[in-house]
Amino acid sequence: MNDIKIGGRSIGAGFPPFIIAELSGNHNQQLDLAMDMVEAAAKAGAHAIKLQTFTADSMTLDVDSEHFVIQEKDSLWHGQSLHALYQKAATPYEWHKPLFDKAKSLGMLAFSSPFDEQAVDFLDDLHVPCFKIASFELTDLPLIRKAASKKKPLIMSTGMASLTEIEQAVNVARLAGCKDIILLKCTSTYPAQPTQSNIVTIPHLRDAFGCQVGLSDHTAGVGVSVAAVALGATVIEKHFVLDRQAGGVDAAFSLEPDELRALVLETQRAHQALGQVTYGGTAAEEKSKQYRRSIYVCEDVQQGQILSTQNLRIVRPAFGLAPKNWDKVLGKVAKQPLVKGTPLDWSMFE
C-alpha cells in the first residue's frame, strides 16, 4: 500500500493516524467563533481542519414542497427545509482564506469539501493540499472528475455507497488523473450508533481498492475511531465544536476540545500498539523472565536424600530448573547437601 503525502504530511500504516477536525456549520455564522474553533483544534493536536464549501443555492432549490423538507422524525433537522438548513450551515466563501491562513499559522493543514464544480476551482485557487468528497456526493461523478483533474490527493467518504458505486467513483477519479485516493468508511446518519458502524469493512475496503482507508466517524466519543485504527484506518475525521450545549448544526455528534485531544492521543496509542506479529516476548520483557517459576529446594536436603515433593517446590523466581523438568527430578538422589532456597541444578543430583 503506497503512502500518501498531503501538504508534506505522510499518511500510511507507518505513521500516526491523520486526524481531521471538521468544522462544518458549527461556527453558527460567526467568524470569530470559527477562528476560535481553529485555534482550539490546533491546541487539541488535530493535524488538519476541514470546511464545507457550498451555498444554499448550489446545494438545493428554495422550494417548500415535501421533497425539499426533511421528513424523518428521528432526524436532528426534522421539519427544516433543505435550503434553510444549508443557509445556516454554509461557511461564507470570504471566510475560507482567513480560516485556512489561521490553521497554517498554527501548524495545521486546511482544506474543504467542494459541493459543486465552481467550488473546486475556488478551493484550487486557494492552493488547498487536497479535496474531500462528502458521502452524499460520492455518486456525483462529474464533481469527482472535476476535483480529480486538479491532480491533488482526493479523500472520499463512502457513506451508503454500494461496492459498485465506490468502484465507479474510484475509477472516475483515477481516469481523471488522481493517483492518491483515500477512502473513508462512513455511516451517513447523524448521529450514528456504534452498532451501525461496521468498521470491519475497513480492511476489506483497503484490499478491494488498493488505497489508504480511514473513518469518517459520526458516533459519540472516540471508541469507534480508536477501534478503526486497530483495523488499519490511517485517517480519522470527526466533527468538532467548542461547546455542544451552545448548539451548532452538527453539535450533537461533534467532539469538544478535550474529546478531540483524547482522540488524537488514543488513536496514536492504538497505532503504536499495532506493532508486528511477535512471540517469545519483547526486549522490554527480557528482565521479566526471571520472575517466571522454577524448581527450588524448599526444605534442607542432606547428601544422599531423595528429592521429593516434600523438599522441592515450583516457585518464583526462575533461576532454577524449568517446571517442565519436574517429573525428571522427583526421585533423584542429592549428591550434596542443599539449603532451603537453593535453585535446583542438574549438577546437584545423580
Image (cartoon, rainbow, N blue to C red):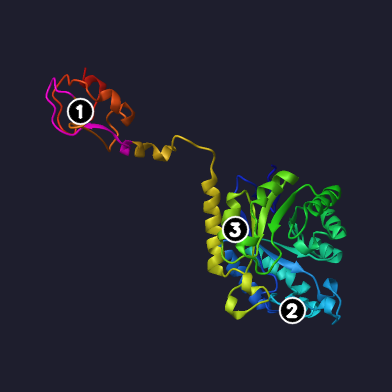
- Mark 2 sits on what residue? 88
Tag 1: residue type? Ser
- Residue reaching furthest left? 302
Q: Quadrant of residue 189?
A: bottom right
Location of residue 329 with respect to 10 vertically, above or below: above
Q: Answer yes or no: do the residues labelled 2 and 1 have beta carbons within 8 Å? A: no
Of the residues shown, which amino acid type is indicated by label 3?
Ser
Kindly give the residue lying farthest to the top in the view shown: 350
User: Which of the two discs, 2 and 3, labels the residue nearer the N terminus?
Assistant: 2
State the quadrant of the N terminus: top right
Residue 71 lies left or right of residue 325; in this view the side is: right
Task: Looking at the image, tell me whether mark 2 or mark 1 is earlier in sequence order.
Answer: 2
Residue 225's mark? 3
Residue range highlighted in magenta: 290-306
The span from disc 1 to disc 3 (Cα, nearest Å) is 56 Å
* Residue at disc 3, secondary structure: helix
Which quadrant of the rendered structure holds the C terminus? top left
Query: Of the residues under marks 1 and 3, which one precedes in the sequence?
Result: 3
Q: Is residue 134 visible?
A: no
Determine the CA span between mark 2 and mark 1.
Answer: 83 Å
Secondary structure beneath dot 2 equals helix
Relative to 293, say whether 144 is above or below: below
Name the foreground residue: 15 vs 93: 15
Residue 29 sits above or below residue 154 on the image: below
Residue 164: % across, % down: 81, 51
**What label sits on residue 308 in the rendered view?**
1
Q: Nearer the viewer, residue 45 or 64?
A: 64
